[in-house]
Image (cartoon, rainbow, N blue to C red):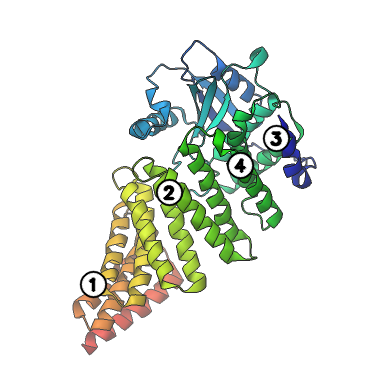
Amino acid sequence: MAFFDAIKTFFQSTVGKQPEAIDFASVQMPVFKVKVIEFSDNVEGNSGEIIARQLSAKEGLEVSYFDEPFNKTFLNLESRTLFDLIDKGQTILDKTGADVLVWGCREGNRIRLNFQTPRQYEDEELAFVSLMDSLYIPARPEAGAYPEALVNLIYGGILSAINASNAQIKIYKHYLLKKNIDCLSKDNSAKSLSIEYMPYIMNFLGIIYLSFAFDKSDGHDFKIVKSLFDTALKHQDLITSPIHLGCIYNHLGQLYDCGTRYLAKNPAAYFKGAIEYYRLSQKYLSKYTYPYDYGYISYKLSKLFFNYWRQKEDIQALRDAVFQLREAEKIYTYALFPEFWAEIQGHLGYLLSLLGSFTKSADISELAINSYKNRQKVITERREPLLWAECAESIGDIYYRIGKSQANKEALEEALEHFHDALYIFENAQQADRIKKLTVDIAKTNQSINQI
C-alpha cells in the first residue's frame, strides 16, 4: 500500500534513529494487561485469537483472550446500545483488572476494532483514544497471521489508549510508543491492504504520534500529526459512518488544544483551531446520539475558553467556559460518574465565582457556592479532608465578597462559619500557610460584621 511508504516520510526525520537503549532488566517495569474480547463475527472464525496471539509477543503487554459467551449485539455502535457497550466493558474491566479491552465486530469483509479503558471519559487527560475510534482490519488474515505492520498499528493503538496514571507508567509508555513508531516507519508489510483501510489507519497513526509527542514544544511534530489526520480527511469518501469522521475532527481539536499549552508561537491560532475542530466534531458526535464524547469535548472546550480568557481577559470567553461546563455537567451526572461530576462541580464553582466577581452578580456567586457544596457531597470531610477544606475556604471567600459588597451580615456570618471549618482541617494537617491566610480572613470578616 502506497500510504505505508508515505509513513516513512512523515516519521523518519524525527524517529529514524533507534530509540536509546535502556536497561530495564534491573527494575520491575509496568505490564499493561490487555483483554482481547472474542470478536463478534457472523461466521466461525478465529481472527480474535490470532490478534491476541500476535499481540502477546509485544513488549510491555500481558495479553489474554476473553471468550466467555455473552450477547454482543451492542457492538454496532448505535446510540441506543452505547450504554450497554460501555457498561459491559466496564464490568469486564473491573472483573479482570485489564488496562485495555480490544473489541472486534464483523462488518462485511472487515473487522472493526475499538479500544476501551477504565474511566475512559473522565478527566485523566492522559490518553487521546475514544471508544468510538475504530480501526478496520481484514476479517480473514492470509496464511493464518496478520501483517506485522498492522499488528504494530494495533499495538500502538493499545499503548495510546492506556491512561498513564503515574510518572513511571508515563515514561515507559512514551518509550514503547517511540519504539512502535520506529517500527511502523520501517515496515511496509501491510502494503497489500486495499485503499478502503486508509482513513482509519491514518487516523490511528495520528493518534499514536500525538500520544508520543503531545507535550513537546516542537512545531515540526505538530505538522507531522496534522498531516496524518489531514490525509485521513482527504479520503473521507471511504469512511462508512459519520462517527469516524467526528473522531478525526476530535483528534485535530486535541492536537490544537495541545498547541495552546505547549507551543508558544502564535497561540491565538491554536485556540481558534482547537475550538473550531472540537465544535465540528460535536456535529457528528452529538449530545443526543453519542453523549459521552459530546460531553467530554464540552469539558475540553470549557478549559480552552477559560485559558483564552486568562490571556485575553475577554468576559465572553469566561461565559462560554461556564456554558460548556454546564453542557458536560448534564451528561456526567452524580449518579453515574460521581468522581468526575465532583471534579466538574469544582471547576464550575471556580468559574462561576470569577464570573460573579467580575459581573458583581450575587446570583451567579450563589450558583458558585452551590457548585462547591455539590463537590463536597463526594469530596467529604472524612474521605478527603484537605480538598474538602479547600472547598469550604472557597465558599467562605464568596460569602465574604457578597457580605462585604452588600453589607449583608448573614453572608458574612456564613463566611465566618466556612472559614472556621477550613481552619480546623488545616490546623490538624499543620498547613502553616493556609492557617495564616484563614486567620487573616477570619479577622477581616469579624471586623466587617462589627462595622454593620
Query: Local crowd at mark 4 within 10 Å, few (<14), some, or many (≥20)?
Result: few
Q: Which residue is mark 1?
A: 414
Residue at horizontal 53 percent and vertical 23 percent from the top: 111
In this rendering, does residue 342 appear at all? no
N-terminal of the pair, mark 2 or mark 4, is 4
Residue at horizontal 51 percent and vertical 50 percent from the top: 125
Could you tell me which secondary element the residue under label 1 belongs to?
A: helix
N-terminal of the pair, mark 2 or mark 3, is 3
Q: Which residue is mark 2?
A: 296
Q: Which residue is mark 4?
A: 234
N-terminal of the pair, mark 1 or mark 2, is 2
Residue nearest the observer in this picture, 215 or 221 = 221
Residue at horizontal 42 percent and vertical 71 percent from the top: 434
Residue at horizontal 65 percent and vertical 28 percent from the top: 150
For the residue marked with disc 1, what is the amino acid?
A: Glu
- Looking at the image, residue 448 sits to the left or right of residue 307; the answer is left
In this rendering, the answer to whether 287 lies above or below 422 is above
Counting from the top left corner in percent of width and height, residue 334 is at 30, 48
Counting from the top left corner in percent of width and height, residue 126 is at 54, 47
- Looking at the image, residue 86 sits to the left or right of residue 212; the answer is left
Q: Which residue is mark 3?
A: 3
Disc 1/disc 4 C-alpha distance (Å): 59 Å
Disc 2/disc 4 C-alpha distance (Å): 26 Å
Please name which of the two marks, 2 or 4, marks the residue nearer to the observer: 4
For the residue marked with disc 4, what is the amino acid?
A: Lys
Please name which of the two marks, 2 or 3, marks the residue nearer to the observer: 3
In this rendering, does residue 66 appear at all? yes
